[in-house]
Amino acid sequence: MSSTKALSQSLPNQVFQFSIRTWFIVVFMGQLIFAYYIIRLYGESGLQLNFERWNAQTTHGYIAKDLMGNVFFGVHVFFAAVITLLGPLQLIARIRKLFPLFHRFSGRIYLGSAFLISLAGFYLAWVRGAAGGLIGSVFISINGLIILICVFFTLRFALQRQLDKHYRWAIRLFLAMSGVWFFRVFLMLWLVIHQAPVGFDVETFEGPFLNFLYVFVYILPQVLAEIYFITKASTIPSLKFVTSLFLGVLTLGIVVGIAAATMGMWLPVI
Ligand code: HEM
C-alpha cells in the first residue's frame, strides 16, 4: 500500500474512532449522572422508608396499599441503578483485557439485571400503566422485548465463545438498555429547542412527538448499530466521514440533552 493510500485510509478511521469514543464518553458520563439520580432519589428515600418521595418524578412510584406494585417498582429502580453503572464498563476494551474475570462476573450481573428489570417493567407497564397511556406501554414493552432478545443472544454467544457475535449482541443490548435514558435526554433536548412542550400534551403525556421519540430511542438505535458495524468494517472513506459527522451532531444533541435533563429533571428532585 502506498503511503498516500495508507494516510487516506487511516484518516477516515481516526475520525471514525474519535467520533465513536467521544459519543461513548458523553453517554458514559450522562449515564453516571442518571445512576447518581436513581441512587439518591429512590435508594436514599427507600432506605429511610420515605416511600412518598418515589413520586417526585412519576405518579406511578409509590401507591399506598399496592404492596406488589411497590415491590416491583423498587426492584425496577434498584436494577436500573445497577445496569446504568455496569453497562458502559462492559464495553470498555481495556477493562475486558486487563480484568477478564471482572468482565465475566459483572457481565452475568448485568444480563441478570437486564432480564429482571424488563420483567418488573412489564408488570409496571401493564398492571400499573406507564406514562403515556396505552401507546407508552406498548413502546416501552417493545423496548423490553428487544432487551430480552439481546440478553439471550449476548449470553448464548458468550457461552459458545463466539466472541465477535457476542460483542455485536452486547452493543445492541447496551443500546436497548439505554433506551429509557435516551428518551429522557432527547425529550429534554426537544424542550430546550422549543422552550415549550410542542407536539405532546403535558397532562396525558401523549402526542405525535412522543410517538416519534419512542421509535427514535427504542427502535432506531438497533438500525444505527448495524450502520456502525458496516461502517467499522468498511474501507470506504466517505462512509466513515458521513457516519462520523452524523454521530458528531448526535453527540452534540446528547450533550445539550444531558445538561437539560440534569438541571431540569434530575438535580431538582434529589
Ligand atoms: C433497561 C433500562 C431501564 C432503566 C434504566 C429504567 C429506569 C427507570 C426509572 C429510573 C424509573 C422511575 C422513573 C424516573 O425516575 O424517571 C422507571 C420507571 C418505569 N419503568 Fe423503567 N427502566 C428501564 C427499562 C424499562 C422497561 C424495559 C420497561 C417496560 C417493559 C420499563 C417500564 C417502566 C415503567 C412502566 C415505569 C413507571 C413510570 C413510568 O411510567 O414512566 N422500564 N424506569
Image: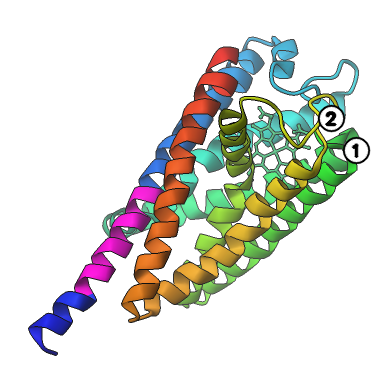
Residue at point 63%, 10% (across, down): 48
The answer to which of 118 and 29 lies nearer the viewer is 29
Q: Nearer the viewer, residue 126 or 65?
A: 126
Amino acid residing under circle 1: Val
Assess whether residue 87 is covered by the magenta stretch: no
When the figure is inspected, residue 264 is found, relative to residue 24, above or below; the finding is above
Residue 18 on the magenta span: yes
Q: Callout 1 environment at 10 Å: few (<14), some (14 to 19), or many (20+)?
A: few
Q: Quadrant of the N terminus?
A: bottom left
For mark 2, does the 10 Å Cα neighbourhood hold few (<14), some (14 to 19), or many (20 or more) residues? many
Quarter of the image that includes the C terminus: top right
Does the CB distance between marks 2 and 1 fall below 8 Å? yes
The stretch in magenta equals: 10-23
Front residue (pair 24, 152): 24
- Please name the residue shown 78% across and 29% down the image: 71
The residue under the point 39% across, 73% down is 239
Expressed as whole percent of the image width and height from the top left, the position of residue 241 reads 35, 67
The residue wearing badge 2 is 69
Q: Farthest residue in the bottom direction?
A: 1
**What secondary structure is found at the residue carrying circle 2?**
helix
Q: Residue 178: percent from the left, percent from the top? A: 57, 47
Q: Position of residue 223 (x, y in %)?
A: 59, 66
Split into quadrants, the picture shows ligand 1 in the one at: top right
Q: Which residue is mark 1?
A: 127
Q: Amino acid at mark 2?
A: Gly
> Residue 3 vs residue 259: left or right?
left
Q: Secondary structure at mark 1?
A: helix
Dominant secondary-structure state across the stretch colored magenta: helix
